[in-house]
Amino acid sequence: MAIKKLVFYGEKSLREPSKEVHKVSQKIKTLVQDLLDTMYAENGVGLAAPQIGEQYRVFVIDVSSGNEPLNPMVFINPKIIKKSGAVVSHEGCLSFPEAYTDVKRYANVLVKALDIHGKPFVLEGKDGTLLARAIQHEYDHLDGVLFIDHSINRFDADKALKEHNLPPVEIEKLLNEPDLDEALAND
Ligand code: ZN
């Protein structure tokens, strides 16, 4: 059990793509435990391996709240196989301490991944729930994509980053998302 040091926005490795896991070895199981320990210590909803300096396609999520029992979910080599609808999501990230901004997300996603035993599973995040949004947020980290890249308004995002002494939005990383724009306009 180990709480790891977080990688913060501005550090280059957050922009680097992560490697597939070839075998759910003891090393990967330790990585998963470190991710969970660090996420809970930081009161996060999700954490991806590159956020603790490990470039592997692994993330964890726990959307339980209040008095609910903990519900750790482990995703190894995840693939988003279906996505639809759109929502505006007010998001932050443990790699961006205290900074929040509105981003575009799909409302529904279907994700396929391996669990901690290396067993495949499929999970649906629906109706713009925290789970649906967290899956997309954490999945992005594995490709070096960050939540601010989905900003509704980059000036608002810049303001939030500046207020918390973080580097500005990387304009060249902003994503063009016509399907989400269209779905949001029709809402
Ligand atoms: Zn994040």
Image (spheres, rainbow, N blue to C red):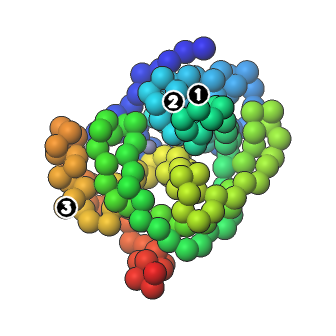
**Coordinates of residue 148 in the picture (x, y in percent):** 34, 54
Asked if residue 107 can be seen in this view, the reply is yes
Q: Residue at x 40, y 36 (%)?
A: 94
Q: Looking at numbered disc 2 in the image, what kind of residue is underneath it?
A: Met
Q: Residues within 10 Å of mark 1 (few under 14, many from 20)?
A: many
Q: Looking at numbered disc 3 in the image, what kind of residue is underneath it?
A: Phe
Asked if residue 18 can be seen in this view, the reply is no
Q: Residues within 10 Å of mark 2 (few under 14, many from 20)?
A: many
Identify the element where label 2 is drawn.
Answer: helix
- Residue farthest top in this picture: 1
Identify the element where label 1 is drawn.
Answer: helix
**Coordinates of residue 51 in the picture (x, y in percent):** 46, 34
Foreground residue among 93 and 18: 93
**Coordinates of residue 5 in the picture (x, y in percent):** 42, 22
- Tell me the distance, in whole angstroms, between the alpha carbons under discs 3 and 1: 33 Å
Foreground residue among 83 and 71: 71
Q: Which residue is mark 2?
A: 39
Q: Looking at numbered disc 1 in the image, what kind of residue is underneath it?
A: Leu
- Tell me the distance, in whole angstroms, between the alpha carbons under discs 2 and 1: 5 Å
Answer above or below: position of 106 versus 56: below
Q: Which mark is residue 155?
A: 3
Does label 1 point to a residue whose CB lies under 8 Å from ligand 1? no
Q: Which mark is residue 182?
A: none
Going from the N terminus, do you reach mark 3 or mark 1 first? 1
Does label 3 point to a residue whose CB lies under 8 Å from ligand 1? no
User: Picture quarter containing residue 132?
Assistant: bottom right
Going from the N terminus, do you reach mark 2 or mark 3 first? 2
Left or right of residue 16: residue 20: right
Answer above or below: position of 10 versus 113: above
User: Picture quarter containing residue 184?
Assistant: bottom left
Q: Which residue is mark 1?
A: 36
Left or right of residue 157: residue 26: right
